[in-house]
Image: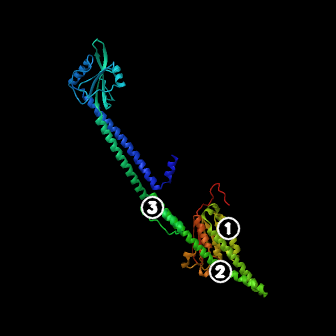
């Protein structure tokens, strides 16, 4: 049995489906065939029983039965020869004596049922049962008890009349029916197996296409492949195909973004690395040749090296932030006080722009986010305002009902550049001389979106730029929620 199960599991899916369909149809056909055969058998036997009962009707046959009982007391066989010649007719006494009528087809074997019936049966209570004749042929017997015979000495005994009809035609009909049902069942099972195989092939054709597509992707890493799906199809295979197409599309986009990130990172790293290498080579050559640089030039080179190293460190930190997966972020998400986060970011912003005036009006607001990432995003927004504000300018910071606005009075952003401000490594042509990697606002957009909010940059009335960050949450933290 275990071997059969292993062999079944080793078959292809379409073969297993065909076998299951064939087995289900075979079971159904077998059940219908057996039921049909027994119903027909019952109907045919009922017909034979009706024919046996009809043979008793009429005064002539009744008189013959009584005469046969009387003759059986004195003679070996009855003398009456006028009767139906398509059946068996005999009398059986309690002692076991049998009198076969001359017009009977032959004698019928006396069964235990007949003997018990002679002793206990009553007149008019006939019993049907199966038996055989002297040649072994099957017959249907109607045993009629309740008769009494008297021998020559005057002793009486019970007797029964056995009337029987041959079952040859009935059995032939049943055998022919069984053969027909067997043939029909076999053809039905074979047809069901073929139909099941065809249905399995047709139903699994999209799965074959999906398998080929997966193998193609694994072999060639081509994520541009798509499986055609009908627009109105809503079955499991169509859903699976759409999921596969969506997955490959997401993977392709992710790979494109990764390649773009690598290319942009390489481009951004090339400039500070080149400048850093040049400055270090100048310092090294000065030491090797023994011709020291003027003190002012040496200090300028060292300051440039320090600035470039700081820029590289910031760029690497931004790249690490952008490369973090969603799963890594999800482990650190908690309820955060946005008011406290903005205050911490303001302290850092005031140190970076001591010549600026930063006015803040903050209301309590709690949201779900990663504390460090959210603070970094707010710092980036404030740094952007500090970077583009002229000396002595004012920066207004407001937090009301989960909406944080940072308004500076700098030169503003041209309208044609606004759609690109959140793209990675994008920097305005007018700001490329300033320090930065072009990743700050991209990190802001990603952090805010991961927290379920949105961020926008727009022109401010009277000049400058206004950054708006909207985050979902509530003025009070949920009950029993720890807040950092």
Foreground: disc 3 or disc 1: 3
Q: Residues within 10 Å of mark 1 (few under 14, many from 20)?
A: some
Horizontal arrangement in the rendering, residue 180 relative to residue 378 (left or right): left
Q: Quadrant of residue 278?
A: bottom right
Which residue is drawn at the image coordinates 35% and 25% (left, top)?
Answer: 111
Q: Quadrant of the C terminus?
A: bottom right
Q: Residues within 10 Å of mark 3 (few under 14, many from 20)?
A: some
Q: Quadrant of residue 56?
A: top left
Element under label 2? helix
Q: CA distance from mark 1 to mark 2?
A: 35 Å
Q: CA distance from mark 2 to mark 3?
A: 51 Å
Q: CA distance from mark 3 to mark 1?
A: 57 Å
Element under label 1? helix
Q: 438 and 142: which one is in front?
A: 142
> Visible in this render: residue 114?
yes
> Visible in this render: residue 368?
no
Q: Quadrant of residue 435?
A: bottom right
Residue 51: percent from left, percent from top: 26, 31
Q: Which residue is mark 3?
A: 206
Residue 348: percent from left, percent from top: 69, 71
Label disc, if present, on residue 343 of the rendered structure? 1
| Earlier residue among tags 3 and 1 | 3
Q: Residues within 10 Å of mark 2 (few under 14, many from 20)?
A: few
Relative height, residue 442 to residue 92 (above, below): below
Residue sitting farthest toward the right? 290
| Earlier residue among tags 1 and 2 | 2
Q: Which residue is mark 2?
A: 271
């Amino acid at each position: 049995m275990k071997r059969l199960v292993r062999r079944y599991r080793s078959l292809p899916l379409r073969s297993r489906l065909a076998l299951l369909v064939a087995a289900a149809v075979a079971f159904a056909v077998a059940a219908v065939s057996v039921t049909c055969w027994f119903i027909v058998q019952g109907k045919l036997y009922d017909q034979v029983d009706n024919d046996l009962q009809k043979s008793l009707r009429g005064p002539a046959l009744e008189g013959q039965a009584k005469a046969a009982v009387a003759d059986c007391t004195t003679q070996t066989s009855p003398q009456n020869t006028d009767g139906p010649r398509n059946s068996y007719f005999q009398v059986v006494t309690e002692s076991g004596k049998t009198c076969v009528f001359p017009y009977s087809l032959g004698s019928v074997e006396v069964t235990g049922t007949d003997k018990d019936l002679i002793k206990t049966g009553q007149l008019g209570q006939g019993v049907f049962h199966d038996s055989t004749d002297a040649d072994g042929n099957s017959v249907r017997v109607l045993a009629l008890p309740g008769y009494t015979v008297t021998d020559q000495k005057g002793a009486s005994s019970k007797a029964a009349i056995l009337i029987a009809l041959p079952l040859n035609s009935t059995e032939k009909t049943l055998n022919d029916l069984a053969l027909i049902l067997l043939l029909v069942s076999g053809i039905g099972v074979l047809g069901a197996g073929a139909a099941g195989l065809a249905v399995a092939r047709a139903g699994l054709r999209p799965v074959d296409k999906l398998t080929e597509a997966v193998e193609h992707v694994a072999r060639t890493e081509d994520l541009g492949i798509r499986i055609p799906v009908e627009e109105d199809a809503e079955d499991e295979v169509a859903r699976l195909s759409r999921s596969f197409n969506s997955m490959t599309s997401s993977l392709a986009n992710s790979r494109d973004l990764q390649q773009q990130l690598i290319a942009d990172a390489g481009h951004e790293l090339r400039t500070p690395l080149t400048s850093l290498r040049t400055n270090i080579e100048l310092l090294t050559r000065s030491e090797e040749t023994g011709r020291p640089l003027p003190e002012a030039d040496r200090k300028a080179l060292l300051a440039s090296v320090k600035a470039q190293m700081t820029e590289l460190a910031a760029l690497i930190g931004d790249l690490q932030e952008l490369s973090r997966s969603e799963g890594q972020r999800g482990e650190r998400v908690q309820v955060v006080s946005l008011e406290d986060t903005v205050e911490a970011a303001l302290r850092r912003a005031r140190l970076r722009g001591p010549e600026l005036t930063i006015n803040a009006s903050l209301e309590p607001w709690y949201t779900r986010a990663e504390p460090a990432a959210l603070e970094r995003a707010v710092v980036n927004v404030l740094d952007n305002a500090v970077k583009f504000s002229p000396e002595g300018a004012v920066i207004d910071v407001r937090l009301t009902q989960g909406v944080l606005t940072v308004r500076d009075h700098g030169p503003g952003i041209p309208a044609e550049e606004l759609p690109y401000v959140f793209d990675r490594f994008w920097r305005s042509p007018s700001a490329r001389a300033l320090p930065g990697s072009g990743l700050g606002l991209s990190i802001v957009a990603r952090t805010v979106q991961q927290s379920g909010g949105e961020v926008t940059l727009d022109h401010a009335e009277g000049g400058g730029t206004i950054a708006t960050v909207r985050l979902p949450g509530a003025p009070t933290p949920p009950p029993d929620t720890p807040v950092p």
